[in-house]
Amino acid sequence: MTNQTPMMQQYLKIKSQYQDCLLFFRLGDFYEMFFEDAKTASRVLEITLTKRDAKKENPIPMCGVPYHSADGYIETLINNGYKVAICEQMEDPKQTKGMVHREVVRIVTPGTVMDKGGVDEKQNNYILSFIQGSSMYALSYCDVSTGELKVTQFEDEATLINEITTINPNEIVVKEEIGETLKRQISLTTETITVSPEISEASYEVNTVREPHLFNATQLLLDYIYHTQKRDLSHIESVIKYEAVDFMKMDFYAKRNLELTESIRLKTKKGTLLWLMDETKTPMGARRLKQWIDRPLIQKQHIESRLDTVDQFINHFIERDTLRNYLNQVYDIERLVGRVSYGNVNARDLIQLKHSISEIPNIKNLLSNFDEQMTAQFDALEPLDELLTLLEESLKEEPPISVKEGGLFKSGFNETLDGYLEASKNGKSWLAELQTKERQRTGIKSLKISFNKVFGYFIEITRANLQGFDPTEFGYHRKQTLSNAERFITDELKEKEDIILGAEDKAIELEYQLFVQLREQIKTYTTRLQQQAKVISEIDCLQSFAEIAQKYNYARPMFSDDKTLELTNSRHPVVERVMDHNDYVPNDCALDNDTFIYLITGPNMSGKSTYMRQVAIISIMAQMGAYVPCESATLPIFDQIFTRIGAADDLVSGKSTFMVEMLEAQKALAHATEDSLIIFDEIGRGTSTYDGLALAQAMIEYVANTSHAKTLFSTHYHELTTLDQSLPCLKNVHVAANEYKGELIFLHKVKNGAVDDSYGIQVAKLAHLPDEVIQRAQVILNAFEQKDKQSPQVTINAVETDRNLMTSSENEQQIAEQHDEASYNINNEDVQTVAYPQEHTNSKNQKQFEQPTFDLFDSAETQSEVENEIKTLNLSNMTPIEALVKLSELQNQLK
C-alpha cells in the first residue's frame, strides 16, 4: 500500500471497510472501480476493463461509469446479487488543496433499494432478519421503500422456512452463520445473506416491542438498515407484531404448485391467481393484493367483513366505476413518502403526491353513498387540505427532473426568488435588444449573441463577415477564435453578463434551498400520508375483488361451522380465463366429516389436477375475502393447505424427484389437522409399481385414521378404488372421457365411481408419438392384459380399525415366499409380461381384489342398464357428436 499514490491509498483504506461491496469511487464525473471490483463489474455490466499505470510492472485493473447515469448500472449489479458502496467527494475539488476528502454515503443492497427504477412498483422489496433462541425463533422484516416494519415469533424451523417463503425477501440478515441445510432451503428464496454479528444499543423509536428476542431481531435489522443507508429514515413505521398462526399456512411447494403469484413454467405473473385477480388501479393496491394472496385469513369475522365490502361494491357498480377513475389518478403514496424521508425525491414526485391527495376528498365523498358500516370502515380517509394547498401554491405543474437546475417554483411563491428571476429575464431581453442594435451598428445581419458555460456571453461573427471589419472601431475585444468565426466581448456586455449570471446562479441556489425546506415540511405529514396509503390500498383491493366477481360471474362463499365443503359448478379461475368461458366444464365437490377423502381416477390429460387445484384456489380466494368461481360455495375455514403435484427434483440439495415427492407428502402427513386441505396428485409414481401402490394406500389410510383432513387424491393405481369398501370416509370419483373410433374425447366432467383405464396409449397418440411406437405399445398392452387374466388375482390389505399387524419376522417370511413364486415369461411375440405373485392371505385380515368395471358415466342400477340409459336420454338437448359418443358407449356395453 505504501507504493501506491495518495489517491489509491485513500481508495484501499475505504475499500478495506467494505469488503463485501463493490466500491463506486467518485473521481470527477465518473465512478471508478479498481482491482477485483473492476473485473467483476466489467463482466456483469459488460463494460470495458482498462488498466491504471499500464506501463508499470503491475498495472491496476480499472473500469468506470458516468456518475449521472450510474443508477442503471447499480440496478444491474443489485439484480445480480451484489452490494454497491457509493463513495462520494465530500469537498469541491476547485476549492481544495491536496487530496479531496471522500467517504461512503450509502450502501445499496438488494433489500434496501430506494431508487424508483430499482424496485417493481407492484411488489414489496423486503429485507428480513431472524435470530434463534434456545426454544424460539424471532423474525423481523421491513420494506425500506414503504416503511413497513413487522416482527413475529415461532418455535420450529418449518415455520421459519414458511415465513421466509411467504415474505419473499430480497436480502436476509443474520447474527451468525447458519447451517448448510437451512441455507440451501433459504436459497430457494434469496441467496443474499449477510452476517452482522453485533446488535447495537442504539435507540430506535420504531422498535417498541418489549420481548427480548423480538426486540433483538428488530434491532439487528434496523442496525443494518441504518448502517447501509446512512441518512434519515423517519418514514419507517413503528414495528407491528403479528402471529403466523393468524393466517392460512402454505409452504413454498404449495404456493409454487398452485401458481399463486408465479407460473411454474415461465416464472412470470401471467397465468397465476395474482394475474387473474389484479384489477387494482394503484401500485399500493397491487402490493396489498399480493400480501392478501400470500396470507389468507382464518378469522371468520374478518373474512365476512371483507366480503360485505365487496358485496357493497358489486351492488353499487356505477359508484365503483367512478371510484376506479379516481384511484387511477392516485400514485404510489407509500413510496413517495419514503423518498421524501430518504431525500431522493424530486419535484415531479411531489407533483404526483399533489395529484394523489387531491383525489382523497373525491373518494371519501363517494364512499358516503354506501351504508354506514362501510363508511365507518374507511373513516380514517382524511383530506389533507393544508398539504394540498402548500404543493399547489409552490411547485410548477411540469417542473424539471433535477432539483439543482432551477425552474421549480411558481411566480409569487418567494419574493427574493422572483427578484432574481426578473433580473435574469430582463437581462435576456436586454441581450436580444443588444443583438438587434449591434447588427444595425456593424451592418452584419448574421451577428449573434450567444452563451456557453465555459466562455459566458459573447458576440459571434462569421469569418466571411470579418473581411474589412475593424473590431476596435466598435469597441470589440477578441475572446475566442474558431475555424469559421471569431467571438468578441464588449465592456457593456461583460457588465450585463455579471448581472445576468449572478441572478441565475442565485436563483438556482435559492430554489434548491426552498425545495429542501418544502421537503422538510412534507415530512411532518409522513404518518398521516402512510395512513391514507393503507386505506386506499385496501379500498383498491376490495373494488378489484368486486370487479372480477362481476366480470367473471363469481359467487359469494359461505362458511360452514361443521367443516362441510360443498362446491356447485366450480371452475378453475385462471384456466377458465385463459380458455373460452363457454368451453370450461364446471364440476361439483362435496366433502364433510363422514366423507372427507376423494379418490380420483381417470385418463391422463382429463383434468384431475386442474380439478384438485381449483378446490384449493377457491378456498384461498374465499379466505382472502373474495367471491369465488362457483354457482354456490360452502366451505370450512382451512388452517393449512398442503400439495403434492407434478414432478420436480432438487438436484442442488441432492434430492431426486421421488425424494421431493416424499418430503412434500411427509409435511402434509406430519402437520395436517382436521381443518387442513391436502392435495395429493399421483403419489408413488416415481418408484416401482408395488412400492408406489403400497405407499399410496398407506398414506390414504394414515389420513383416514389420524388427521381426517379434507383430501383430494388422484391416482392411476386402480387397485386403490376398492378402499371405499373398508374406508367409509373415502369416495371414488372419476373424470369422464370416452374413446370414439380410436380417438380419445375428454369430457372433463367429474362423476361418481371409479374407472379402470388411464388411456395412456391414447394420450400418447394425441402427443403424436410415432405410429410404430403406438402400435407396438398396443400389442404389448394386450399381451399384458391377457396374461393378467390368466394369472392369479392380486390381493391387497383391507383396512380394519383393529387389524393385527404381523411381526417383522412374519413379514420377511411372507415377502420371501412371494418373491420365490414370482415368474417371468416371454411369449412368442417377444412381449415381456409379468405373472403377478399369489399373495398368502388370511381370510379374516385380507380380501381378494376384484377390479369392478364402472361406466364412464352415471347409469341407473337396474337389471338392464343399457335399456335404462336409453330411456333416460334427453335427445333434444344432445348435439350430434354427443349422440354418437353415447351410441358408441352403449354398443361397447353390449359386446
Image: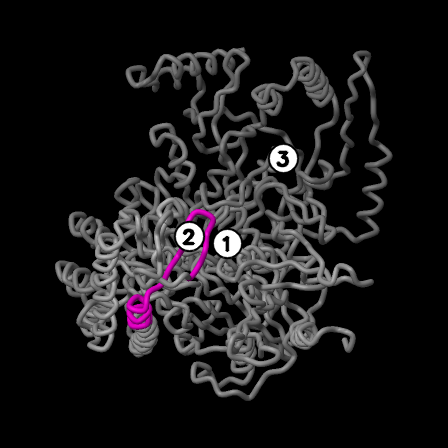
Q: What amino acid type is highlighted by mark number 2?
A: Ile
Tell me, yes or no, whether the highlighted magenta stretch contains residue 497.
yes
Magenta residues (range): 479-501
Q: Secondary structure at mark 3?
A: loop
The location of residue 620, given as percent across then percent down, is: 42, 52
Circles 1, 3 touching at the beta carbon (< 8 Å): no
Q: Earlier in the sequence, mark 2 or mark 1?
A: 2
The location of residue 49, given as percent across then percent down, is: 68, 54
- Number of residues whose C-alpha sits closer than 10 Å to that of mark 2, classed few (under 14), some (14–19) or many (20 or more): many
Res. 727 in view: yes
Residue 796 location, quadrant: top right
Q: From what the image shows, is residue 850 above or below residue 56?
A: above
Q: Earlier in the sequence, mark 1 or mark 3?
A: 1
- 247 vs 472, nearest the viewer: 472
- 686 vs 839, nearest the viewer: 686
Q: Secondary structure at mark 2?
A: helix
- Number of residues whose C-alpha sits closer than 10 Å to that of mark 3, classed few (under 14), some (14–19) or many (20 or more): many
Which label belongs to residue 620? 2
Q: Compute the Cα span from label 2 to label 1.
A: 9 Å
Q: What amino acid type is highlighted by mark number 3?
A: Tyr
Q: Residue at x 55, y 13 (%)?
A: 742
**Which one is closest to the eye, mark 1 or mark 3?**
1
Q: Residue at x 50, y 70 (%)?
A: 141
Q: Secondary structure at mark 1?
A: strand
**Which one is closest to the eye, mark 3 or mark 2?**
2
- Number of residues whose C-alpha sits closer than 10 Å to that of mark 1, classed few (under 14), some (14–19) or many (20 or more): many
The location of residue 2, given as percent across then percent down, is: 77, 78
Q: Residue at x 46, y 38 (%)?
A: 611
Quadrant in which the C terminus appears: top right
Circles 2, 1 touching at the beta carbon (< 8 Å): yes
Q: From the image, tell me which residue sits under label 3.
A: 717
Q: From the image, tell me which residue sits under label 1.
A: 641
